[in-house]
Amino acid sequence: MTQQCAFISQLSNTEQQNWLDKLNAKLPNVRVMLAREMSVAEKQQCKVAVVANPKPEDLTEFPQLVWVQSLWAGVERLVAELDNPSFALSRLVDPMLATIMSEAVLAWTLYLHREMPKYMAQQKLAKWQQLDYKCAGERTIGILGLGELGKSSAQVLVKNGFTVSGWSNTAKVIDGIECFFGREGLETLISQADIIVCLLPLTPDTRKLINDDFLTKMKKGTSLINFARGAIINHHDLVKQLNRCHVGHAVLDVFEHEPLDESSVLWQHPNITILPHVSAPTHIESASKIVAQRIDNFVLTGELPECIDMVKGY
Ligand code: NAP
């Protein structure tokens, strides 16, 4: 008998149809259906849902859900909004996404390393001035978070000649990367880095982690790249430390409220580069293959993929 899997999202109709087509083409024994097209009886029997930014209340229409698979790698909002869910939640883990994020980390690290913001500012003043050159190995890049995205980004930076350190919750050994963990480890990483890249999940422990205390422990002129979640940074403290020139430059791709409000002071700051949450978009072809394989495996064996630890929050 064909199993049904609900698709619950706030994506546009075209985006939803694109995902449904991609998933259904790879799942001969499962029918992925828009939740709104399912009958009450179908919703009540449904065990699996694929989601992309669902409204938590939409999930309550599915009392038998065993497993919910997100199409995104970050599920922080959903984890925060779900109150002790009866189903397991898994997020997207896709090597293609890690490659895309590593490319972004390399691109924006090079932007800072080769002083592009300073040369752009000089051009506006028609100022011809060569800045001192440092080679990649003379720059230490500190990566916060050594998970799927952080580890891969750190390894790409090492391949490109940078000196790389990383910080995680638990101790790690990764070739070519100086690994730190715990509070003490964080302080050492902060004090050594020339550029800090944030790839941590947003959890109660990491919310506003990058605050005045964190920023003042950085060396003068250290720059910041945030490709994780906006609420990990206290932006008020960041602007203060940028204005004091203690922080060199900040590349911000993520914000607590997106899209970033037109009236935000962050837009106009000369030492901030704003990106509209583009560092690592989900690659639909690759992600749909992985999600379809997981659904197929669950239907065949009843086995769940690795799921979010709701206590740790990631
Ligand atoms: P992940 O595999 O879960 O890795 C998270 C890493 O953070 C792990 O190394 C973990 O340590 C570490 N960590 C968590 N809490 C910590 C704490 N309190 N102190 C120290 N280290 C801590 O996550 P991921 O797949 O790499 O993704 C990271 C984040 O990227 C996502 O949560 C999402 O917010 C963001 N993201 C952004 C975009 C974008 O386009 N901007 C796209 C995708 C994802 P352990 O390894 O010791 O557990």
Image: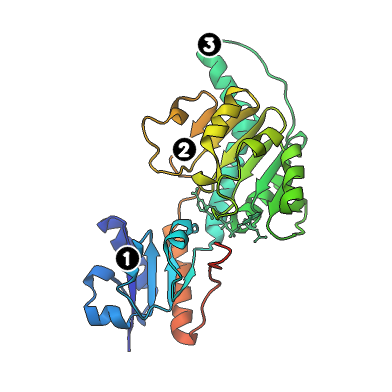
State the image coordinates of residue 287 (x, y, percent, origin top left): 46, 63
> If the picture is divided into quarters, which one holds ligand 1?
bottom right
Identify the residue at horizontal 57%, vertical 46% (top origin): 103
Indicate which disc, 1 or 3, sits on the residue closer to the N terminus: 1
Q: CA distance from mark 1 to mark 2?
A: 31 Å
Q: Is residue 36 above or below residue 282?
A: below
Horizontal side, residue 160 vs residue 263: left or right:
right
Residue 156 visible in rendering: no
Closer to the camera: disc 1 or disc 3? 1
Disc 3 crowd, CA 10 A, few/some/many (<14, 14-19, 20+):
few
Is 88 on the left or on the right of 216, as rendered?
A: left
**Which residue is disc 2 drawn over?**
275
**Residue type beneath disc 3:** Leu
Neighbor class of circle 1 (other Cα within 10 Å; few <14, some 14-19, many 20+) is: few
Other-residue count near label 2 (Cα within 10 Å), few / some / many at <14 / 14–19 / ≥20: some
Residue drawn 43% across and 61% down?
78
Q: Report helix, strand or loop for mark 2.
A: loop
Res 26 visible: yes
Q: Which residue is mark 1?
A: 57
Q: Residue 243: image x %, image y %?
A: 58, 23
Compared to residue 160, the image places residue 90 above or below, namely below
Residue 203 image-quadrant placement: bottom right
Which residue is disc 3 drawn over? 125
